[in-house]
Amino acid sequence: MTQTATLPAPTLSTAPFTIYNPVQKDSVTFLRRTDGRCSTLVDVELAPGGGNGLHTHTAYSEEFTCREGLLGIHLDGREITLRPGESALAPIGSVHRFYNASPEPVRFRTEIAPGHRGFEQGLILSYGLAQGGQVNAKGIPMNIWHLALIADMTDSRLAGPLRVLNPVLTSLARRARARGIEAELLRRYVNTTA
C-alpha cells in the first residue's frame, strides 16, 4: 500500500504556509493564494542544481524577483541571471524556465498573474507526491495519470521538441478526471474541498 503525505490544509487567506519537496530539496511558501481577484504570490528556496524544464503557460504570466543568490532564467531563447532585487517577466505564451546553477541555495519570489488556483493546487499536489515517494529523482511523477493531471492543472505546456506530447497529456488528464483520479489526489494531498 502506498503511503501518503498530508500537507497542511491551504486556505484562501493571506496566512503563509510552506511546502517542502524532499526530492528536489526546495521549498515554496505561499504568501497569497488567489480568490479569483488577486494574483498568486510565492517565495521559493531553490537548492543548488534545482530548476524546472522549458515550458509555457496560456493563462498567466510569471514574474520572478531574485531575493538572495543568483537565479538563472531562460526566457524565449535568452539566458538571464538575476541578482538580488532584479526581476524578469515571463509573459503568457513565453517559453521559459528557472534554475539555480550556483553551489548555494537561491531565494526568489514569483507572482502569478492573474492568480491561478490550478497552479496552486498542482504545486501542492506535486510536493505531496514527492513526500509520498511517487516521483523520480527529477521530481517528475512516475504515474502518467498524475503527470498529465499536474501539467493540465498548472497550465504548464511542454516546449521545444517535447511539445508534440501536449495533446497526449491533455487527453490523459481528461481521462484521469473521468476516472476520479484527480478528485482522489486532491483529497489525499491538497486536503481541501475548494
Image (tube, helix red, strand yellow):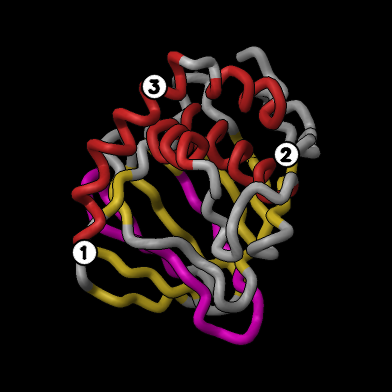
State the extent of the magenta-drawn residues as a range: 86-111
Q: Is residue 82 left or right of residue 135?
A: left
Q: Look at the numbered disc 3 and give the secondary structure of its residue.
A: helix
Amino acid type at image mark 1 = Asp
**Tag shown at residue 175:** 3
Q: Look at the numbered disc 1 and give the secondary structure of its residue.
A: loop
Residue 116: percent from left, percent from top: 44, 31
Label 2 near label 1: C-beta < 8 Å?
no
User: Which residue reaches farthest front?
Assistant: 1
Question: Label 1 belongs to which residue?
Answer: 76
Does residue 111 show up? yes
Label 1 near label 3: C-beta < 8 Å?
no
As measured in the structure, the alpha-carbon distance from the residue carrying label 3 to the one carrying label 2 is 34 Å
Residue 132: percent from left, percent from top: 74, 45
In the foreground, 173 or 179: 179
Q: Look at the numbered disc 2 and give the secondary structure of its residue.
A: loop
Image quadrant in which you'd find residue 80? bottom left
Amino acid type at image mark 3 = Arg
* Quarter placement of the C terminus: top right
Residue at left offset 32%, top offset 69%: 74
As measured in the structure, the alpha-carbon distance from the residue carrying label 1 to the one carrying label 2 is 32 Å
As measured in the structure, the alpha-carbon distance from the residue carrying label 3 to the one carrying label 1 is 32 Å
Q: Is residue 91 left or right of residue 32?
A: left
**Tag shown at residue 16:** 2
User: Which residue reaches farthest bottom?
Assistant: 103
